[in-house]
Amino acid sequence: MNLTLKIWRQKNASDKGSMVDYKVNDISPDMSFLEMLDVLNEQLINKDEEPVAFDHDCREGICGMCSLYINGEAHGPDRGVTTCQLHMRMFKDGDTITIEPFRATAFPVIKDLIVDRTSFDRIQHAGGFISVNTSGNTIDANTIPINKHDADTAFDSATCIGCGACVASCKNSSAMLFVGAKVSQFALLPQGQIEATDRVLNMVKQMDEEGFGNCTNTGACEVECPKGISLENIARMNREYLKASLKG
Amino acid sequence: MSGILNSSIGRKFAMALSALFLMIFLLQHFVINILSVFSPDAFNEVSHFMGTFWAIQYLLQPILIFGVIFHFVMGFVLEIKNNKARQISYAKNNGGANSSWMSRNMIWSGLAILAFIVLHFIDFWIPEINTKYIIGDMTGMHNGEYRYFHELVEKFHSPLRVGAYIIAFVFLALHLLHGFNSAFQSVGANNKYTKGLKTFSKVYAIGIPLGFIFIALFHHLTGH
Ligand code: HEM
Ligand code: SF4
Ligand code: FES
């Protein structure tokens, strides 16, 4: 396949940045999207040009590090996959592909296609944990029986990999799907009850302080989420938040 | 409870509550208006009662006006905040791939409704207030009969006005097609009833505006 790529290039956080066109030839449909970018970067390095900077780590769809807004969608046109699991067979020979960084005030660009997603880490630090002994007298998680439905639902929420596609896809750059998942994975389990009130209040407060937008329930996040995190998580967070506000 | 309107979820919750309140009001407004098609007398009686009963005039009407103002002011606040959350927009964005047009354009359908409300106030509300509280005529009478039905038919003579009302109701339907169901999600109701609520919301969002269009066209075309 021969392709034209329109890629966002930006030297550093303070650079203005712009879209630049590139051509890549002989791309195999079996390549992943990131491998295709590797081919481009090899070309650029051979020409003594600066390679395109993009995030990646596991390249097997589990770490949440790869990002990219491809042809107007987070992680590209395929469903239920991260960019590293997106394959070039989703595109046609001769296509022009637009590649941009995830855009949100709370995700500032560091360089080219790499954005700073530490705002997610700060939300997690604000309450996305439980307090248990982990050394010496570790308690077996299975000592408290949990019904299967709750266990399964909590597990579904816990599959969120913190990639930020929900924020990138949302017209309001809202982080509510991510925070909803992180609140839900504990809200459904007995181990999560002790900090339940503080957790949701603190995580939402941090989310607001980071400058994420408000949810309009467009549902774009749910469609683009590589892990199929559902809007139910946002509804649950809203209930938890109201409960906590009435209490504290 | 303190400062709940300062949080994103609190604001959404307040937005949804004001919207749900407006949904109830809209249904009530529709039920009274549809009477005008079947029985001018009944329409006159109910209109007079609504226009003169103290609890409605001095209690419910101010609550309604507050509800409407709160809803659109909060709509603007959310819109401004949401725009701030992404200052550089995408060169290419395929919103249609993951969300409905209605959901992405609530502010535009809302603004169309706001323009309609202004027109509607000038058409009906201001003359009413003028007759009742400025002139001081609380009888509701004109030439020996109730004036309400007569005024309604008079207003719908103009094809321009009927056209403007129809366009506004189309925008209302678009607003509600996303909004009604969205309000349930905002207050945290996403459960086994969600599918039923979605269907109910759709029927309401299309049915009520269509009903209002029918009423306007009925009086316009029949002339009474
Ligand atoms: C007066 C002009 C109006 C404006 C400017 C307006 C604006 C808005 C906006 C911007 C939203 C989306 C808020 C968000 O981002 O979540 C919204 C939601 C909504 N609006 Fe309106 N609106 C207006 C009138 C109405 C009326 C008359 C009704 C009903 C009779 C209504 C029903 C709703 C509903 C049900 C929602 C969804 C609430 C939610 O998502 O929780 N609106 N409105
Ligand atoms: S909710 Fe989905 S899209 Fe959002 S961060 Fe988690 S995995 Fe990524
Ligand atoms: S690189 Fe780990 S999920 Fe894509």
Image (tube, rainbow, N blue to C red):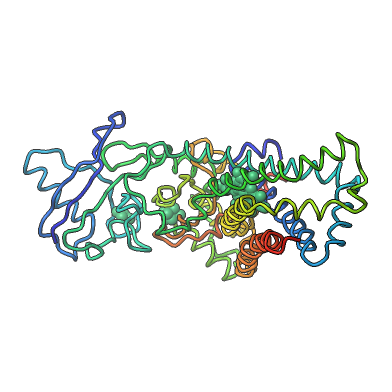
**Residue shown at the point (63%, 52%) measured from the top left:** B165
Q: Pick the residue in front: B25 or A17.
A: B25
Left or right, B91 with respect to B10, comes to left
Indicate the position of residue A30 as horizontal and vertical percent values. Answer: 19, 66
In the displayed structure, would residue A153 be above or below residue A198?
below
Specify the quadrant of the image occupied by residue B183: bottom right
Q: Pick the residue in front: B53 or A56.
A: B53
In the displayed structure, would residue B52 be above or below residue B220?
above
**Residue shown at the point (40%, 48%) measured from the top left:** A168
Can you name the residue that lies furthest to the top here? A14
Q: Pick the residue in front: B72 or A200.
A: B72
Left or right, B36 with respect to B175, comes to right
Indicate the position of residue B115 as horizontal and vertical percent values. Answer: 61, 43
For the C terminus of chain B, give its image quadrant: bottom right
Quarter of the rendered image showing ligand 2: bottom left
Left or right, B65 with respect to A86, comes to right
In the displayed structure, would residue A112 be above or below residue B183?
above
Indicate the position of residue A26 as horizontal and vertical percent values. Answer: 10, 59
Specify the quadrant of the image occupied by residue A115: top left
On the question of residue A240 being in view, the answer is no
Q: Pick the residue in front: A96 or B184.
A: A96
On the question of residue A154 being in view, the answer is yes
**Residue shown at the point (93%, 51%) measured from the top left:** B144
Left or right, B139 with respect to A66, comes to right
Indicate the position of residue A1 as horizontal and vertical percent values. Answer: 14, 61
